[in-house]
Amino acid sequence: MSILCGIAIGAQRRIAVPIGPIPPAPKQKATPTIMIALPNYDELTATRLQIFLDNSDFGPGKIDGKMGEFFRKALVSYKHAHATRETGFIDQWMLDQVPVTFTTYTIKGDDLAYVGDLPSSHEEQARKKFLPYTSLLEFVAERYHSAEAYIQKLNPGTDWEHLEPGDELKVPNVLPFEIENIKEMKLVPNKAFAARKIYVDTKERLLEVFDNNQLVCVFPITPGSTALPAPVGTWKIVGAATWPWFRYDEGMLNYGVRTENYFNLPPGPNNLVGVVWMGLDRPGIGMHGTNNPETIGRAASHGCIRLANWDAIRVKDLVSVGNTVIIF
């Protein structure tokens, strides 16, 4: 499947954080900002809360033990969805859902099939059959939804250049992104999800899925750029596929004009659209994964809705072909 979209590649201290309320109707194009006072949790508590939110499909961004922007938005969104206090103060029961903050991952021989050399040029990448992770560190960090620097911090003294099967690493106890279990498939209509709607908030950089009036999930995104913003309007999901190919055409990416000067890039976690593509009824526009989860919410994309691979694959399982997508 060829794709036309592309991407650029201790003490508690209360902090006022802007966060927009959930859009109540498809016609809404913008949301006012309100201020929510949130405490600043220590690293261990923040990690446990990030794990709880991530496991609940309220994505806090990469797990790093920090009280970042998307962590705070996920916490408030979760409370909003479950009709609890939205002040940001934690309930002990949330922490109780994560009795073990860290676990151990043992490198397996099969993991090496997903790690290898990745050429820097698109021309050379197009000659490959698969675009792999460039290191076992990258493999493990994405598997556990984490910043690479945090995995390194949790494992001081590790020789990252010479990891091998049998080596053990300390990792956050989050439900893992198991790339080996992603089967090549296309999304088909799901009657159980037929009424669901996806809201893409380009200001708050969030993707939200609603089932009638119930908020199902929230994930951080990169929604286009200033030059090529995500198209505001109401659209439909017309198809989706895992392990997509990517048609890298600079004319299409930069000017919306299809040219014959392009490269077909093969599937892989380092494909520019990641491991899943969900196309909209707007040519060249879709919701998809990424080759660089560290940049979600920060770096620009070429008009599409970009998520971390571990979030994109979950969105695929929470929506259906035919669902309405409101970008505002």
Image (cartoon, rainbow, N blue to C red):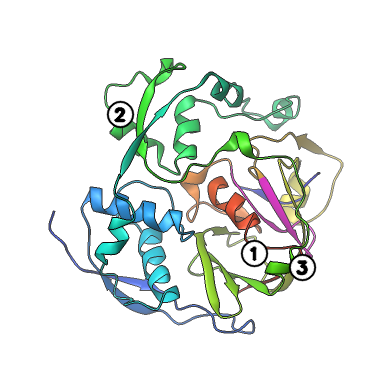
State the image coordinates of residue 303 (x, y, percent, origin top left).
66, 59
- Magenta highlight on residue 288: yes
Q: Position of residue 95 (x, y in %)?
A: 28, 57
State the mark number for residue 63: none
Front-most of 118 and 107?
A: 107
Q: Which residue is mark 2?
A: 155
Crowd tier of the residue under label 2, counting other residues whose Cα lies within 10 Å: few below 14, some 14–19, many 20 or above: some
Between the residue at mark 1 and the residue at mark 3, the CA separation in whole angstroms equals 19 Å
Q: Residue at x 47, y 17 (%)?
A: 165
Give percent across and percent down for residue 257: 82, 54
Identify the residue at horizontal 36%, vertical 72% (top origin): 18
Q: Classify 137 as above or below 84.
A: above
Q: Amino acid at mark 2?
A: Asn
Residue pointed to by mark 1: 230
Q: Which mark is residue 322?
A: 3
Disc 2 or 1, which lies upstream in sequence?
Answer: 2
The answer to whether residue 142 is left or right of residue 195 is: left
Q: CA distance from mark 3 to mark 2?
A: 45 Å
Please say if 256 is above or below 184: below
Which of disc 2 and disc 3 is earlier in sequence?
A: 2
Disc 2 to disc 1, C-alpha distance = 39 Å
The residue at 44%/36% (across/down) is: 141
What x and y, as percent, mark residue 203?
51, 70
Q: Residue at x 73, y 42 (%)?
A: 244
Magenta part of the protein: which range? 276-290
